[in-house]
Amino acid sequence: MTTVAITGASSGIGLRAARRLAEEGHHVLALCRNVERSRAALGDQVEIVETHMEDLDSVRGAAERAKQAGVEVLINNAAIFDMGLKRRTLSPQGHELVWATNHLGPSALAAELIDTLAAAPDGRVVFIASKGLVAMPRIRIRWDRLDGEGWYTPTRAYYHAKLAQVMTAETLHERHGDAVTVSCLRVPAVRLDPAKLAAQPRLQRALYAPKNRAAAAPAQVADAYVRLAVGPEPDAVYVDERGAACPVPRFARDRANRERLAAATRAAIAPETGAVG
């Protein structure tokens, strides 16, 4: 039995992966913002830990519970991509909400847990990126606007943070790869659950409907989560849903860029948290 912490497990891929892991007999900690919805979706087969990924204090609280449970695997699944979020919104610590939820929170959680994972017989951390980065070969980290002011759109903010996750995974592999297996899954377009699709603005629902029908089923991608969590070690850090190595985005290949992001991330999440800096 492996103790696995997974964020955002109340719907979509995370829900399917949490169920699969629990059904296979693993101890699953579902780090979710809505405890009631998570309990309704997951039942009693997993442990629910209330966690708001945009709030660094909440992330640290969840990390403490994960440490107590002897976490061996972390899956940083939670993310937001809300086309209805037209205006820049801030987290409790004053960071742009998408950057905070999709990059700072996962990075802080990994930093808090890296020593515990390293002490496990087969410690692992899984980050999640997006195949959409392939269509953005010139994407880069906006060093002077990390929190989105002046250039924010939901799409820009989302892929900016996903690029940062690829870079963070590569950095953690360089620094802790001898003790922890670090991977980053390049997720393809995935079919939205009906409730999530219904929550989108009407125009967005209409535009997304054809893509949603052609997208991969969440359960298929959940198989990749489970494989990276408890299956054979991947052959590369950045992999697709089949486990094949993916080309790292151009900007992320530069070690100086990765080091600069690690320092900026450390400064944002806590000076004393050095695992990503």
Image (cartoon, rainbow, N blue to C red):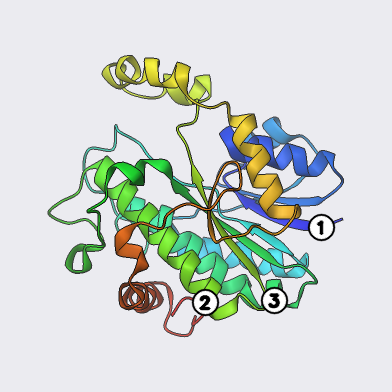
Residue at 33% from the left image edge and 75% from the top image edge: 264
Residues under labels 1 and 3: Cα distance? 14 Å
Which residue is the site of mark 2?
174
Seen in the picture, residue 103 relative to 175 is either above or below; the reply is above
- In the picture, the disc for residue 118 is 3
Element at label 2: helix
Q: Give the number of the mark in front: 1 or 2.
A: 2
Residue at 36% from the left image edge and 24% from the top image edge: 200
Q: Is residue 80 visible?
A: no
Which image quadrant is residue 180 in?
bottom right
**In which quadrant will I find the C terminus?**
bottom left
**Residue 212 on image: x %, y %:** 44, 21
The amino acid at mark 3 is Ala
Residues under labels 2 and 3: Cα distance? 14 Å
Which residue is the site of mark 1?
2
**Residue 162 on image: x %, y %:** 39, 52
**Residue 39 on image: x %, y %:** 70, 37
Looking at marks 1 and 3 on the same chain, the residue that comes earlier in the sequence is marked by 1
105 to the left or right of 91? right
